[in-house]
Image (cartoon, rainbow, N blue to C red):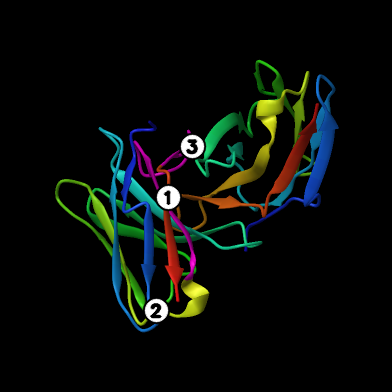
Amino acid sequence: AQTVTQSQPEMSVQEAETVTLSCTYDTSESDYYLFWYKQPPSRQMILVIRQEAYKQQNATENRFSVNFQKAAKSFSLKISDSQLGDAAMYFCASTNYGGSQGNLIFGKGTKLSVKP
Amino acid sequence: DSGVTQTPKHLITATGQRVTLRCSPRSGDLSVYWYQQSLDQGLQFLIQYYNGEERAKGNILERFSAQQFPDLHSELNLSSLELGDSALYFCASSAAWGANYGYTFGSGTRLTVV
């Protein structure tokens, strides 16, 4: 079965510094997509960044970037110049296209705290 | 506002009861997905509908059922509720069958079974 693993239940970062959240995944698909979602205390799930597996170039969205290592099946999220508003749960996810599936598989999340 | 509407936002009910959660997808989206988020469990995929048809099933209990109506809104029915069913239930939508561009999530329904 397809799995997504986030090995860091909690992380902490000082405001204005950089933090990296880890994610590994396991898939037998040749074409797939990877995502990071943010869930602030409001509970709303917000898409942070998306990566297409067939693209070598790492995705970037403003202060958020990924380090995508396809061979290692690793997909980490780097947050630069951390802000108080970045405090949230972060979920890594992968598309699940085995059989007729078309959904996302999520990791268990990493809770990020930002210290002023 | 994400464009995905879930009602109600909060629901408190007793064990053994039945409830219905409602979801209206973002305008133009044909796929609806239901997820359950329990404490320390991340998001568990329950079921997917595409344009009125069931397309994929995840870890959905037999006590749970869902459907998508011609106007594309979806309902998740939970019956014979148990304490362990207390969770946040999310609905999400996407334009096409798959999740290549990710989902747009609703704000969730917090279900508490007492």
Q: Quadrant of the C terminus of chain A?
A: top right
In the picture, measured across the screen, residue A99 lies left or right of residue A71, that is left
**Which one is in front in this view, the residue at disc 3 or the one at disc 1?**
1
Label ID, residue B108: 1
Mark 2 belongs to which amino acid?
Leu
Mark 3 belongs to which amino acid?
Asn
The residue identified by callout 3 is: B100
Quarter location, residue A12: top right
Residue contact between numbered discs 2 and 3, judged by CB atoms under 8 Å: no
Whether residue A75 is visible to the viewer of this picture, yes or no, is no
- Residue occupying the point 65% across, 26% down: A55
Q: Vertical placement of A69 versus B13: above or below?
A: above
**In terms of secondary structure, where does tag 3 sit?**
loop
Residue A72 lies, in percent from the top left, at: 81, 43
In the picture, measured across the screen, residue A67 lies left or right of residue A109, that is right
Residue A44 lies, in percent from the top left, at: 50, 40
- Residue occupying the point 61% across, 45% down: A93
**Label 1: few (<14), some or many (≥20) within 10 Å?**
many
Chain ID at mark 3: B
Q: How much space separates mark 2 and mark 1, taking CA atoms?
A: 18 Å
The segment highlighted magenta reads: B86-105
The residue identified by callout 2 is: B81
Q: Earlier in the sequence, mark 2 or mark 1?
A: 2
Chain ID at mark 2: B
Q: How much space separates mark 3 and mark 1, taking CA atoms?
A: 22 Å
Residue B105 lies, in percent from the top left, at: 43, 41
